[in-house]
Image (spheres, rainbow, N blue to C red):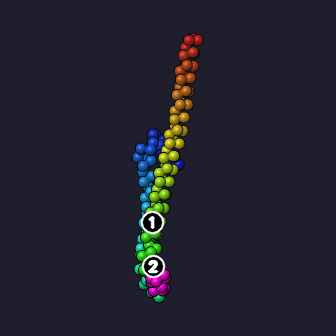
Amino acid sequence: MQYPKGGEKDTHSDAFLRRLMRRQLRLSIACAVTFLIALLGLPLLNYFFPEAMATRVFGFTLTWFILGVLFFPFVWIISWIFIRRSIALEEEEAAAASEATVESGKVRKGEQRQGAEGKRGSGEKEQAV
């Protein structure tokens, strides 16, 4: 994952939050579309296939069986998937941000060492002159 330079690798930065919110928005839209397909699909099935939807399943018509028995578990499954994926997205983003922060810390330590060595080296040159 690429983060912009300049301290925006922090989990509290605007870039981090914007990216996380964008990914969660895509997940929310996908779940909402799935729900709407199920919600609007039942009336459409009744309209286009009335004979099939009138068949009896466990004492109910297929319409009522889908609406009364299958619809709620379907919504729970959508919710469960949404929650799991949302948590996974947050963990992925946090891991990437902490990894980027650790890497930038290593770079900073290396720069500090080089700077300290450069100062020592210049002091030695001055003393030799």
Give the percent coordinates (x, y) of residue 37: 44, 72
State the residue in front, 5 or 70.
70
Q: CA distance from mark 2 to mark 1?
A: 16 Å
User: Which residue is tagged 1?
Assistant: 76
Image position of 1 with respect to 102: above or below: below
Residue drawn 49% across and 57% down?
A: 85
Residue drawn 52% across and 28% down?
A: 112
Magenta run includes residue 72: no
Give the percent coordinates (x, y) of residue 125: 57, 15
Q: Where are the magenta residues, as a range?
A: 52-61
Q: Amino acid at mark 2?
A: Phe
Residue 65, numbered label: 2
State the residue in front, 93 or 119.
93
Tell me which numbered mark, 2 or 1, is placed earlier along the sequence: 2
Please indicate, yes or no, whether residue 50 appears anywhere in the rendered image: yes
SS of the residue under disc 1: helix
Q: Amino acid at mark 1?
A: Trp
Whether tag 2 and tag 1 are in contact, CB under 8 A, the answer is: no
Say which quarter of the image contains residue 68.
bottom left
Give the class, few, some or many, for how many residues have Cα within 10 Å of label 1's Cα (few <14, many ≥20): few
Image position of 37 with respect to 129: above or below: below
Give the class, few, some or many, for how many residues have Cα within 10 Å of label 2's Cα (few <14, many ≥20): some
Residue drawn 43% across and 70% down?
A: 72
Give the percent coordinates (x, y) of residue 50: 45, 86
Query: Which residue appears farthest toward the front when viewing the image?
Result: 59
State the residue in front, 11 or 125.
11
